[in-house]
Every structure is written in structure tokens, then in C-alpha cells.
Amino acid sequence: MEQQVSKRRKARLKISPSSNQRRFRQQLAQRVCGTHLGLMLLLPFHLKLGTWPMLKQYLGSADDLACHMALQMVHEAAICTNRIRAKNTLCNQGFAIANGLSFLPTDKQIHELSDGQSMEQSLALQLALARRRKELGHYNPANILALDPHRIITQSGRIMPRKKKMPREKAAKMMQTFFCNDALSGQPFGFGIASPGRSCTRASTQLLAFLEQIGLPSALLLADTEHYTVELLSTILEHPRFDIIVPAPNAKHIYQLYPTMEFKQYWPGYALAGKPFQFKGHEQTFQLIVQRTGLTRFSYKPFVSTSSQDAFWQVNQLYPKRWSIEDFFNFDGHMGWNRAATMNLNVRLAKQTAALLAQAACFELKQLLPQPFSQWSAQHLAKTFFLDFDGSLKVRDDTIVITFYGVPEKLGLHQHFTHLPQRLARSGINPKVPWLFDFKVDFVFK
């Protein structure tokens, strides 16, 4: 029995694009029934985003089979699984067909594909996606951005520096990611990745170079205390496009300035003051903004900013929006930003970049859903939409027709997915699906 399994596995490793297409069409001819066909609901949004052309450019080869496998990584993220076989089993038919495959590539194959892509290639894919999302209006035009160093605990056996996620927590092995999100829409622009030894300042400087390429005319960055370094603040002060506001520590060189500042009260118990500020030994001038709360006994929270905007607007109206990046990790983190099974940075960045594609497609899907479904977390969406709908598949001429049974009408899916080829054509999108070998896809709800 073990020898037979080994032979089948070797055959899959050597499968060619032409044989995959032939076997894929054979599966379609036999029809398919299962609960993983819900992943097909992401199909129109992949077409809208241009997921397939991006993956082809990312892989840099004419090997469509590799693109199908990369699309599998995207859909793994969409269903919030770290391996293709959740609990060592994952239905082949519906999941594989959503990727245009007649088989399930193994974890080893996916690992090798990811390892073959450099970090520069993954960042180029992030850049292409961010530009496309900017065109589609996923980001607020005010360009208020949130920076966050998101650290992920890893069980890697490698020797590495240990870091703390929170000051009172025990230091542990971490993989570092450095995110930039739109603070108003909550949607990610992109992120960098690094080993625990990389400093936040260095990683953030590299992230600025990434943001420059997206083409933002200007932006205000909302940072946290880890970004309070002379090097980073000086870099942004000299930058023509970016400004930053960052919380400062209540250190002696700051709190000794409080008595000399004139506070303006906005309501009882809340006042602000601003003052030019310089670091010792540096000639550059920043704006020190101090928030004072309390009626008789005061507490102070200082900020340093490179922006000339009104202090109240920066601290009271804009800075609280930074919390949207924490909401992003709470709602979408299970797509791939809550685990780090390996410290191979090529592999982790490739998989987490695939998760960005999945998150963008899911964001488009949620825009069509009524409340409260549009506010569901990634796990809830995956369980209910992608892994729970009973569906069957058949081919009618050049169209794959997917029938879903028992889908609640309150979701409103029939309003957006029936007669899908015609809807896509009216929107100027070619309804032929390249990773499904130019079949069109339509949906029926019963």
C-alpha cells in the first residue's frame, strides 16, 4: 500500500501542464459535488483585481502549472489554513478545481515553489497589487497611513535573538513583519519581513521606499513608540512626500519642557500644547505636541510630529484611527499573519504575499454583503462561505455552472452572482477564466 502511495506521489510531482489540463477537463465531465466550491465565489474578484496576470509576472515564467500552484497558496490563505490538508484531509475536488488543478500539490511542492521566489519578487507582487487596489478605490484618498511592527511567535529551532511582543511578556523567538495600512479604510498597502535582528528603524525606512513606488502624492504616517528614533524622524522630515506623528516617551528631556508650554483647553479635562522641539546634538526642528488630561491632577502624553497640520487635528482626530491596523490583524490575521512555521524568509514572504491577494478578493466580496456579514472575520467568512455551502458543478457548452443549495437569501448572493458572465462583460471584464482554461463560470442558487 505504501509503495502505491509513493508511486502516485511521484506521478504528481512529474505532472505536466498539458496532462493537468486533460485530467482537469475529465473531472469536469464527471461532475463534482462538495462543500469547497464556495471558493469559486472569489472568482469574479480575482478577475477584477487581475490576480492571474500578477501571478504570471511574479513567477516570471510561462509555466502555467506553477501559477496554478501559486493560486492554491492564495486560496489556502482564503480558507485560513496553513497546510493544504486541514487536519490532514482536504477535499480534492472542489478545492483543486478552484485553482484549475486536477490534483492537490503537496506541502513540499508548495514549499519549493515559494522558496524559488526571491523576496524582491514577492515585494514586486505586493507593489502591483497595491497599485491595482489604489485604482479600484480600496484606499481613502486622504492618505492617512498606519505603521505597525507586527511580530509573530515562531517555533523555529534556529538560534536567534528573542524579542517581546509586550513589555511584560517573556521574550520569545519572533518573526518580524512591518505593515503599512490605510488608517481610514483599514486595507493594507504592503509589508516587509525580517529576522528578529532587524531594527524597526531600518525596516521602516525600507517600507518608505516601497510606499514611494505606489505613487502616493503625500501621506501622514501614524506610528507607534518603536518608531521614535532620531534616524527615522530625520529621514521623514527630509522626505518631500511623507510626514509622521509618533508617541514620545515621558523622558526627562521632554517632561522638563511641560512647564514652559501654553496649553489650550478644548473641553474640561482635555488640553493640548505645541512647541518646536530638537533632539540634543541635532539641528532639525520637529513639533512637540503634548496632550494633557485631568482636572486637578494631570497626566501627559507627548507626541513628536513632522507635520505642520493643526495639533488638535493630528492628535485627537487622526491618531486614534491608527487602531484600524490592530482591527486588521484581529479580523484578517488568520489568513497568514498569525503563524510562522518556518524562518525561511523567501517562503514566509511568498505565502504572506499570497494572503494579501486573498484578503483583497475577500474585501471585494464583503463589499457586496449586507450587514452584519460584511463585518465578519476571515475565519467566519471562510467557514460559512468557502467551506460550508453544498454545491455541485457541471459544464454547459463553454460555461462551468455551479449550483448551490440552501444558501440563505438574506446573504443576497443571487443578486450578484447569477448570470455572472453577462455581468462581467457589462463591467468590461473578460468572463473567460484563464486558470480554468478559458471556461466561463456561472452560479445558480436553489
Image (tube, helix red, strand yellow):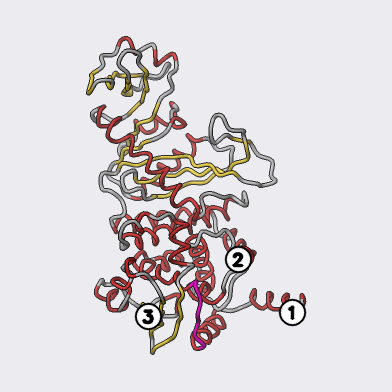
Which amino acid, by three-letter code, is at mark 3? Lys
Tell me where residue 13 sits by quadrant.
bottom right
Which amino acid, by three-letter code, is at mark 2? Arg
Q: How many marks?
A: 3
Crowding at dot 1, Cα within 10 Å, few <14 / some 14-19 / many 20+, comes out as few
Query: Which residue has dot 3 on it?
Result: 440
Earlier in the chain: of badge 1 and badge 2, it is 1
**In this rendering, would 259 be left or right of 190?**
left
Closest to the camera, between mark 3 and mark 2, is 2
- Tell me residue 434's x, y (percent): 42, 76
In depth, the one of 396 and 50 nearer the eye is 396
Residue at left 49%, top 88%? 29
**In this rendering, would 249 be left or right of 110?**
left
Crowding at dot 3, Cα within 10 Å, few <14 / some 14-19 / many 20+, comes out as many
In depth, the one of 147 and 374 nearer the eye is 374
In depth, the one of 188 and 298 nearer the eye is 298
Earlier in the chain: of badge 1 and badge 3, it is 1
Which amino acid, by three-letter code, is at mark 1? Gln
Q: Which mark is residue 260?
A: none
Q: Which mark is residue 85?
A: 2
Quadrant of the frame with the N terminus: bottom right
Instruction: Based on the picture, tell me whether residue 33 belongs to the magenta stretch.
Output: yes
The kind of secondary structure element at disc 1 is helix
The kind of secondary structure element at disc 2 is loop
Query: Which residue has dot 1 on it?
Result: 4
Quadrant of the frame with the C terminus: bottom left
Residue segment shown in magenta = 30-36
- Tell me residue 306's x, y (percent): 32, 29
Label 1 – label 2 distance at C-alpha: 20 Å
Earlier in the chain: of badge 3 and badge 2, it is 2
Label 3 – label 2 distance at C-alpha: 28 Å
Residue at left 28%, top 78%? 422
